[in-house]
Image (spheres, rainbow, N blue to C red):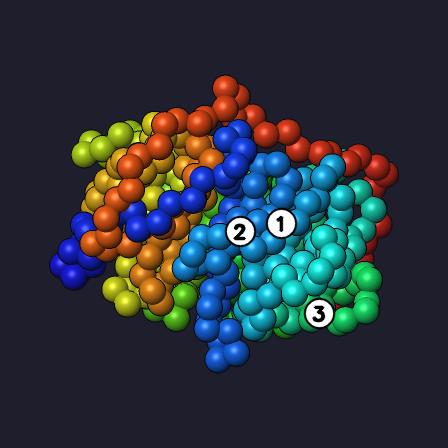
Amino acid sequence: MEALEEQLSHLSIAKRSTMKDSTTYILDIDVSKSTEEQNSQTVAILCSDKTIRLYNKETMTCLQEYNARPDVLSGVRFSHTNGNLVFSACSDGTVKLWDARSSGPGAVQVYTGYPSNVFISFDVSCNDLVVCAGTEKVESDAFLVFWDGRYIANTESKEPLGAYSESHNDDVTQVRFHPTNPSLVATGSTDGLVNVFDINENNEDDALTSTCNSDSSVNMIGWAGRDFKQVYCLTHDEGFLWWDIAQVDTEEAITLCKVDDMREHVSECHVDYLVDGFYHEKQNTLLLLGGSHNGDISLFKCNKGQVTHLKNLAGGHTATVRSVFWCGGDEFLITGGEDAQLLFWKAKATSPKKKDSMKMASSVQQRVRVHSTKSLLTKQK
């Protein structure tokens, strides 16, 4: 563990990129996987102006921009096998697939949902075979919708394979496939539940393998632990929960750690909110990132029963940090926030001069809502 603490203690800003529009928030970040065919990596960011922007990771030059106006995009994910393909869920009831090689500005494939669907979360399985999106609640319904994720050229749209409709009763805020097992997917909702499904099962009841209750509204979830047999959750009231789902069918307690409010839990630094977490595979350690509204970031290490402060990352952002991405292979951290800045943090780098604050007067992002009659869905695979 000393090696991890030593490594993180030397994190500093290696690169900085600033959006042309100083009122643009960076809401989500993903980085393409390195393959034998594609050695260079691309950074995708989701922006508050309803665009996706692709950057060369080495030069930080903008390669492409996709515009979804007037609809709102939720999340951005690269294909695991093709770094040219980028997915995003959309408030118009679709998941859109964009191809960086395409000369046109539009999506190359559209995954259409059911009537009344407004997608606010989604993910792609580790083998790219399944796309799953979570919806806002409309009347009494909140859905998980599934598609065949494979890109088929010259196919304008794809219909759903089916949907789960009974396991959540409020907005599905998070969908996260298992990093190595394509049949497992975890979901979180404002109903407080974090569910894990095995989508190889024939129906929703059998597919639901475990349910953990956060007793709050779920903001972020992720996988952790050896073989990724653990799930963690950040709540909208800044709580943290960490479960070992391998213990679900045993007499052992499944809760590894619970913090009701991180703002009151830490004394070594000031935390206004939790940003996200990531699992450091080499060190078998779950790390959390908290932030202050002046742009400072704090790193925390999670142990069974406790969360301890490791490192402050100051002098970078000047406003609320909205998104982070940890690249385990190259061991660097990317952060984006409300100051329209994208920062790369790496050990023993020389820090560029801190920029002045470019925070908007209001941090409220409007979302498009679609309301229609209740859709009639049947569970199917």
Q: CA distance from mark 1 to mark 2?
A: 8 Å
Q: Which mark is residue 126?
A: none
Decide which of tag 1 and tag 3 comes sooner along the chain: 1
Q: Secondary structure at mark 3?
A: loop
Q: Residue at x 26, y 30 (%)?
A: 270
Report if the CB atoms under discs 1 and 2 are less than 8 Å apart: yes
Q: Quadrant of residue 159?
A: bottom right
Indicate the amino acid at tag 1: Glu
Instruction: Say left or right for 276 vs 88.
Output: left
Task: Single out the mark in the foreground, 1 or 3.
Answer: 1
Vertically, is 280 above or below 300? below
Depth check: give the residue in front, 233 or 125: 125
Q: Which mark is residue 151?
A: 3
Q: CA distance from mark 2 to mark 3?
A: 24 Å
Q: Residue at x 82, y 62 (%)?
A: 156
Q: Which mark is residue 65?
A: 1
Q: Secondary structure at mark 1?
A: strand
In the rendered view of the protein, which quadrant contains the C terminus? Answer: bottom right
| Residue for badge 2 | 62
Indicate the amino acid at tag 3: Tyr
Decide which of tag 2 and tag 3 comes sooner along the chain: 2
Q: How far across and how far down the image is residue 143, in percent? A: 70, 49
Q: How far across and how far down the image is residue 56, in percent? A: 48, 58
Indicate the amino acid at tag 2: Cys
